[in-house]
Image (spheres, helix red, strand yellow):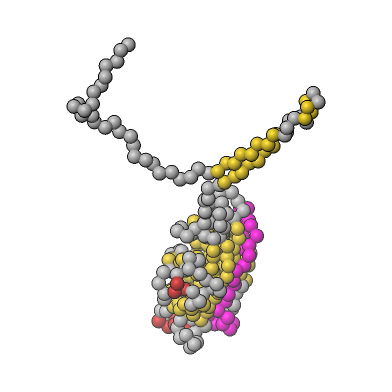
Amino acid sequence: MAFPAVQSSSTGSRTSNSGPFGTAIRVSMPAGVQVGDLLIAHGAGNSNLPTPLTSGWNALTTVGDVNNVKAYWKIADSGDLGATQDWTALAGSANTEAAEIGIVRITGHDPVNPIQQSHFTSSGSGGTTVNDSGITPTPLQCLFLILAAGSNSTAARTTSGYAVANNNPSWAEVFDADSAGSAGSNHTLAALASANQTSSPGNATGNATAVFSGSESNYLVGIVAIAPAITLTAPTQALTSTLIVPAFVRGIVAPIISIISTFIAPAVSTVLKKWSNQSKSTSAWNNQSKTP
């Protein structure tokens, strides 16, 4: 069994539309991206929702649509190798406002259904300590991600205090990026932390929490469980046993007997055609009489 793990991450930001990429937020792919890797992206725009300009991204949540923060996922393809991607957050005069995007690269995930569960909470009323109601993951050894993003027009923020209410694991911050504007300008924040599941499958995480260093006008916080890739192989087990009889039996040296047995998983067999009783020609076949 391969377990999901964060391998690398990258971030990109825009403080206005006067930068080298105009209104776009340009983000380099995380280092070492290979075809088949899982990519998770999330971020915020001060007044507008960051949207990928390249195909293949799937919305991980829609609850942030009205609050300018959102998360996405995709399986990396050949076009993602060593690439940069442009995102946009456009809506009239908001072209000049800040936006922040973070992308994380994960391996060891289920290649078909990598997102085992996710849940997000967003608000436009501001907050410092933000909570999501959590999830109840099913498989063993999921990778947990807590994503937090927000925006304000006051000052840069940082994120900490990642936790779940039940069986809280040890969280490792993957990135914590602010759009780096000056005080009094528009700011956006994207932060993410990861941890391995420590509770038994089927146990609820309880509230997922992140703490901003100051109140955000809009925010999104959520938790995602990344399902592991499971590879089943037929076991082959060799068992060696030795039976030693008493060395002397009435003055005779008895032999030492060794028994070696090997258990090998059965080979795949092909089901043969079922047997049928063929019809018999009465002219060629005769059922002989039987004497008692």
Question: 98 or 247, which is in the foreground?
Answer: 247
Residue at 54% from the left image edge and 68% from the top image edge: 105
User: Seen from this angle, which residue lies furthest top?
Assistant: 292
Q: Is 171 located above or below residue 150 in the figure?
A: above
The quadrant where residue 95 appears: bottom left
164 lies left or right of 109: right
The verdict on residue 72 being magenta is no
Q: Give the position of the C terminus as an image quadrant.
A: top left
Image quarter (top left, top right, bottom left or bottom right) of the N terminus: bottom right
Q: Which residues are magenta?
A: 162-187
- Picture coordinates of residue 52 (x, y %)? 43, 74
Above or below: residue 279 compared with residue 270: above
Looking at the picture, tell me which residue is in the foreground, 37 or 64: 37
Numbered label tally:
0
Tell which residue pokes out farthest to the right in this image.
251
Identify which residue is drawn at 45% across, 78% down.
Answer: 86
Q: Position of residue 16 (x, y in %)?
A: 49, 84
Does 163 lie within the magenta span?
Answer: yes
Nearer the observer, 21 or 119: 21
Residue 175 % position (x, y): 59, 71
Q: Is residue 276 left or right of residue 196?
A: left
Q: Nearer the viewer, residue 131 or 251?
A: 251
The residue shown at (37%, 40%) is: 272
> Residue 248 at x, y = what percent?
79, 28
- Image point (27%, 16%), residue name: 289
* Residue 47 in sight here: no
Residue 43 in view (yes/no): yes
